Image (tube, coloured by chain):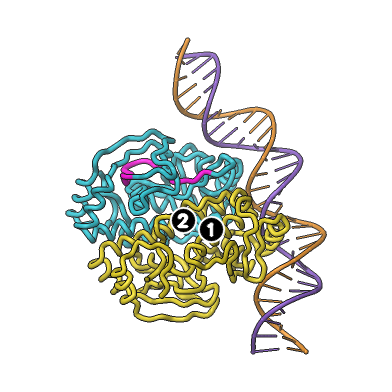
Chain colours: A cyan, B yellow, C orange, D purple
DNA sequence: CGGAGCGTTGAAAGCCCTCAACGTTTGTGG
DNA sequence: CCACAAACGTTGAGGGCTTTCAACGCTCCG
């Protein structure tokens, strides 16, 4: 397991978490891990790859509600809630560590500080949800793209997965549309506009941020809500 | 304090929570309680009235990201995060109980089961956020209204604040628009359509659900995500 | 009684979607 | 290595949902 960035965990706590992992699995791209309503008895730590949480709509499309990257606790929400209200799946190939809920019980009883960090991790998810609502509710298509890709850039950079202002991002335009409440056709047109405007280039799985300031203005983006400065939840040591 | 519905708390725990309240305040309608970025040292239990959490957009409009009703813990998120990423304010007149974070510390150390319930309460907020994303991202204007008002109905009914299929709801059409990512003009037209279709009547602060089934289909609404059957977080005893 | 806020309605414009076609890339099997 | 299919990306035209702009009625309150 690769811990990165500043985290609020002591070495002993990292050790506790690492010891709680029952097994590690590799999932292909576009695999469903958990379906809505399923009772869940494991929580999942994402070690590499990109996963998402989403809900299906009647029209056959889905709405992504969260994107998970390296180091994220993917479905800790399922632990207190016992079942999930949404589906969880991979977008790219992914490596995950499975932690049985029984061991989470133990952690909560014996390691209150670690328990606090786990709570905090779910609250960061909620903060990302809120910004997701803002993005879809108040921004136009170009703004949504700018906001979403800047958010992703900051998150990936925080875990060391960005090279300068460039990062690998193996999502299709359809995926972007399902995240942003747009059709893939319109995503295509807006990406073209951003490229031609010299703001951002997204080609063949690579995002290049060309003008961070203008993107931030366009997407009304302020990374405050990521709470990066205070130590993100970056997985198990 | 009025506890309602089935809750997962023992009487002793209710007592602990009640003892943690430092004071009770009454807020006028349309008052800001906390601004984005403010350091917070209290968490707030909503005893009566309707509050909301929201974010401002550049165009002067705001995007609501959560609605809080009687019995909700309004900003428990601020406890682990130390500051909030959004504003919190009242929509109607409201009565709140203030719990200093220092006493939440004590609860967490001495009452692990109560701590779990508090965590769970923030996860229910996150589940509502997710459904909010779905609503804005995948439904048209009429569907959003149907979904939002059904959600509100189920939540209010769970705390005994609905009379049959009718409930008091003192929001303006502007408020609804800010919740749903629509203009107040369009909200007006869609409310009219719902009324003329015999699905729902929203007049002078009162919502009357006329055809629950058709509304649920229109809004693709399934109350699973409210986790009502397992004991909601309904305030302090 | 005047004003402000809210609700209502119409007309026109704009953003995004739908439908459709075609080019490009990727992966697979012969 | 090539052929082929499937998935993805690109582009155009037309239509629809929602917004914008504007005006007016109603209610409530100072």
Q: Nearer the viewer, residue B198 or C15?
A: B198
Q: Which of the 4 image quadrants contains residue A27?
A: top left
User: Helix or strand or loop: what does disc 2 sit on?
Assistant: helix
User: x%, y% of residue A72?
Assistant: 34, 49
Residue identifier under label 2 = B226
Q: Is residue B103 left or right of residue B37?
A: left
The quadrant in which the N terminus of chain A is found is top left
User: x%, y% of residue B115?
Assistant: 30, 63
Q: Nearer the viewer, residue B36 or A118?
A: A118
Residue located 38% across and 63% down the image? B7
Residue located 38% across and 76% down the image? B98
User: Helix or strand or loop: what does disc 1 sit on?
Assistant: helix
Q: Which is the main secondary structure of the residues drawn in magenta?
A: strand
User: x%, y% of residue B3?
Assistant: 41, 70
Q: Residue furthest front?
A: B164
State yes or no: residue B71 in magenta: no
Residue identifier under label 1 = B151
Start-end of magenta stretch: A41-56
């Amino acid at each position: 397991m690769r811990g990165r960035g500043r985290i609020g965990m002591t070495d002993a706590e990292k050790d506790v978490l690492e010891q709680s992992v029952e097994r590690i699995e590799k999932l292909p791209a576009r695999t469903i891990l958990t379906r809505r309503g399923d009772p869940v008895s494991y929580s999942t730590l994402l070690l590499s790859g990109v996963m998402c949480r989403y809900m299906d709509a009647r029209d056959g499309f889905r709405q992504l509600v969260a994107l998970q990257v390296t180091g994220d606790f993917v479905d800790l929400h399922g632990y207190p809630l016992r079942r999930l209200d949404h589906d969880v799946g991979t977008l790219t190939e992914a490596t995950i560590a499975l932690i049985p809920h029984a061991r989470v019980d133990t952690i909560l009883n014996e390691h209150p500080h670690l328990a606090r960090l786990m709570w905090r991790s779910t609250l960061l998810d909620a903060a990302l949800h809120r910004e997701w609502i803002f993005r879809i509710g108040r921004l136009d298509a170009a703004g949504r793209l700018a906001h979403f890709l800047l958010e992703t850039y900051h998150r990936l950079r925080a875990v060391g997965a960005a090279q300068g202002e460039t990062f690998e991002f193996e999502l299709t335009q359809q995926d972007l549309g399902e995240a942003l409440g747009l059709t893939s056709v319109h995503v295509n047109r807006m990406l073209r506009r951003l490229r031609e405007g010299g703001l951002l280039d997204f080609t063949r799985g690579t995002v290049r941020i060309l003008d961070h300031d203008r993107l931030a203005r366009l997407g009304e983006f302020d990374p405050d809500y990521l709470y990066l400065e205070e130590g993100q939840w970056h997985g198990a040591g």
